[in-house]
Each structure stands twice: as structure tokens, then as C-alpha cells.
């Protein structure tokens, strides 16, 4: 940032010694050091806060919006179920229409085939 070499620092130190004198120079050096430490601490604080914000933004971008994704998945599933229900309803209406259009069975012929009787349910033995 600053291009200050050793020779320039030596000139600054000699000028400070001449201007301030040997009694006030150590106090001024401590005061300058205190301000430099405070400036560095403030700079590191700002820098770390900036890095935390950048990390949080990156995390938000990588995670995305799970609530929105879940909402879209529910809407897709609802749409698919609605389409399946409409298809099934159409098939049921078509089967009912075919059953009404079918000629009645003759007296000697069996009617529509019946489903086989269900097997009786067996209860498990009590322990």
C-alpha cells in the first residue's frame, strides 16, 4: 500500500525526536501505536463481518428455497392425482355406459361373471 523503506522510516524517527524531544517521544509512540492497533482491529472486524456475510449469501444460494421447492412438489403431485382421478372417473363412466347398453341376459344364460367369494378372515390365536 505505502512504499516506505527503512531510510524513510529513519528520517521520520529523527524528525519526531527533534520535534517532540526525548521526554515526549515515548508517550507519542505509545499513543500512535494505540491508534494503529485500533485501526487494525476495526479493519479486521469489518473484514470478518464482510466474509461472514459472503459465506451466508453463498449458503443461501447453495441451499436454495426448500419451502418453495416443497410447495412445487406438492402442486405437481396434486396435479398428477387430479389427472389420474379424471382418467379413472372417465373409465368408470364408460364402463357404466357399456353396462347400460349391453342387452339383458337370456333366461338360461348366466349373467355377468361374479367375483369369487372372499375367504373367511382368520383371527390369529390369542397369546
Image: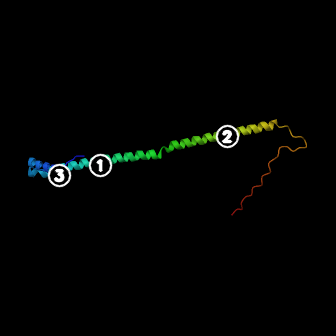
Q: Secondary structure at mark 1?
A: helix
Residue under label 1:
44
Crowd tier of the residue under label 3, counting other residues whose Cα lies within 10 Å: few below 14, some 14–19, many 20 or above: few
Residue under label 2:
85
* Colour convention of the picture: rainbow
Foreground disc of the pair 2, 3? 3
Q: Is residue 31 above or below residue 123?
A: above
Q: Quadrant of residue 111?
A: top right
Q: Secondary structure at mark 3?
A: helix
Crowd tier of the residue under label 1, counting other residues whose Cα lies within 10 Å: few below 14, some 14–19, many 20 or above: few
Q: Residue at x 29, y 49 (%)?
A: 44
Numbered-mark total: 3
Q: Earlier in the sequence, mark 2 or mark 3?
A: 3
Q: Earlier in the sequence, mark 1 or mark 3?
A: 3
**Distance Cα–Cα, label 2 vs label 1:** 62 Å
Residue under label 3:
6
Residue 9 place in picture, x, y as percent: 16, 50
Crowd tier of the residue under label 2, counting other residues whose Cα lies within 10 Å: few below 14, some 14–19, many 20 or above: few
**Distance Cα–Cα, label 2 vs label 3:** 85 Å
Residue 91 place in picture, x, y as percent: 73, 39
User: In front: 14, or 20?
Assistant: 14
Q: Residue at x 57, y 42 (%)?
A: 74
Residue lying at the far bottom of the rendered structure: 127
**Distance Cα–Cα, label 1 vs label 3:** 26 Å
Q: Secondary structure at mark 2?
A: helix
* Quarter of the image with the C terminus in it: bottom right
Foreground disc of the pair 2, 1? 1
Amino acid at each position: 500500500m505505502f512504499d516506505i523503506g527503512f531510510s524513510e522510516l529513519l528520517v521520520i524517527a529523527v524528525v519526531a525526536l527533534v520535534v517532540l524531544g526525548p521526554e515526549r517521544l515515548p508517550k507519542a509512540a505509545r499513543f500512535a501505536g494505540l491508534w494503529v492497533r485500533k485501526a487494525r482491529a476495526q479493519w479486521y472486524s469489518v473484514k470478518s463481518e464482510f466474509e461472514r456475510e459472503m459465506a451466508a449469501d453463498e449458503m443461501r444460494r447453495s441451499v436454495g428455497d426448500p419451502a418453495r421447492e416443497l410447495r412445487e412438489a406438492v402442486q405437481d403431485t396434486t396435479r398428477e392425482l387430479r389427472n389420474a382421478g379424471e382418467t379413472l372417473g372417465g373409465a368408470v363412466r364408460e364402463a357404466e355406459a357399456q353396462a347400460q347398453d349391453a342387452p339383458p341376459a337370456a333366461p338360461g344364460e348366466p349373467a355377468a361373471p361374479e367375483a369369487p367369494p372372499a375367504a373367511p378372515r382368520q383371527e390369529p390365536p390369542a397369546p
